[in-house]
Amino acid sequence: MNPNDPATKQDLETAVQAAKRDLSEAKDEFLEAIRGIETKLPQAFYGYAKNNDARLL
């Protein structure tokens, strides 16, 4: 296909499906990263508080 040819409905549908698939994959990766942060952040605060408690006692 020549890059100057007009896009067909099938070309557009293929591009839309590819974009949806890419967005879905990006969403999954983003949610996985957020879940990791949700786990690590409280653990970091717990470790900090535990060290402070040990120092005060």
Image (cartoon, grey):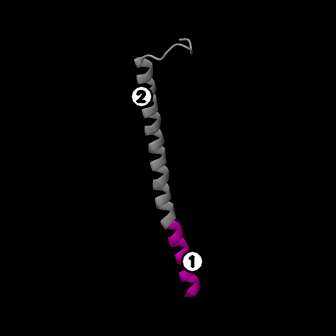
Looking at the rendering, which quadrant does residue 48 occupy? bottom right
Q: Earlier in the sequence, mark 1 or mark 2?
A: 2
What number is the disc on residue 51? 1
- In the displayed structure, 56 sits above or below 25; it is below
Q: Amino acid at mark 1?
A: Asn
Give the image location of residue 23, x and y in percent: 45, 38
Q: Are marks 1 and 2 in contact (CB under 8 Å)?
A: no
Eyeballing the image, is 25 above or below 44? Answer: above
Can you identify the residue that label 2 sits on? 17
Inspect the magenta stretch and tell me whether residue 52 lies in it: yes
Badge nearest the viewer, 1 or 2: 2
Which label was assigned to residue 40? Answer: none
Residue type pointed to by label 2: Gln
Magenta residues?
A: 43-57
Horizontal and vertical percent for residue 12?
43, 22
Disc 2 element? helix
For the residue pair 20 and 30, the one nearer the viewer reads as 20
Residue 47, quarter of picture: bottom right
Q: Quadrant of the C terminus?
A: bottom right
The residue that appears at 51% across and 61% down in the rendered structure is 40
Where residue 11 appears, as percent x and y from the top left, is: 45, 19
